[in-house]
Amino acid sequence: MSGVAVAATGLVVSVGVLTKSTPVDGAAAAQSASAQTEQTTARGLTQDELTEREQQASRSSDDRRPEADRGKARTLSNAASGRAVTKTQDLSVSDPKTLARALMPQYGMSPSEFDCLDNVWSQESGWNVHADNPSSSAYGIPQALPGSKMASAGPNWADDAETQIRWGLGYIKDRYGSACAAWSYKQGAGWY
């Protein structure tokens, strides 16, 4: 970059000299040329050597991607022989409590609020997907009243824990803002 800066400075000075109608003092011109030479050779390199170095260091003039790609491929192939482990879990077959804990952040609730949610739904349904209250027609894990309200979360609401939990978390978020606020209300009112 310093070679480019020196060249640009020289060009600006030259253009300035050529466009001015006043004569340039010979001593001043010599001093300017001397300063340019000192800048160019400050590292002991000529302008040509600086330009060559700049081109060698430039990423645009020397594309190193193929070499880097080969290096990455070697690294990845070596890693493949090690114990790289990835894990996925199908939450739809999980314990409803594990599923609820995993889904809470999607509804703006911290997993640290799980104890509050657990208290609410343990008292409401015992986390039973088929819990049915014959006196009120409340149904499922969140005891939706009526149970058919959960159809807004999915057509399989009557038998699917994930659908019921999603509906229940949405209900709690919309009505109370948090699982702990729902638990607090339930403690006073006996329902939520």
Image (cartoon, rainbow, N blue to C red):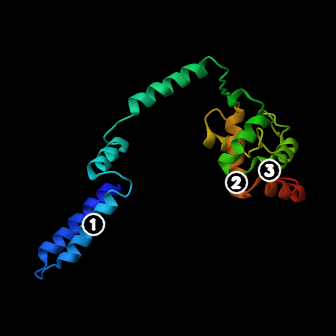
Q: Position of residue 86 (x, y in %)?
A: 65, 26
Q: Amino acid at mark 1?
A: Ser
Residue topped by disc 3: 113
Relative to the observer, which residue lies in front, 45 or 102? Answer: 45
Viewer-nearest of discs 1 and 2:
1
Picture quadrant where residue 121 is located: top right
Numbered mark located on residue 34 in the image: 1
Relative to the observer, which residue lies in front, 18 or 47? Answer: 47
Q: Which residue sits furthest left?
A: 21
Q: Earlier in the sequence, mark 1 or mark 2?
A: 1
Relative to the observer, which residue lies in front, 9 or 108? Answer: 9
Label 1: state its secondary structure: helix
Residue topped by disc 2: 173
Q: Amino acid at mark 3?
A: Glu
123 sits left or right of 38 in the view: right
Q: Earlier in the sequence, mark 1 or mark 3?
A: 1
Measure the alpha-carbon separation of dots 1 and 2: 76 Å
Numbered mark located on residue 66 in the image: none
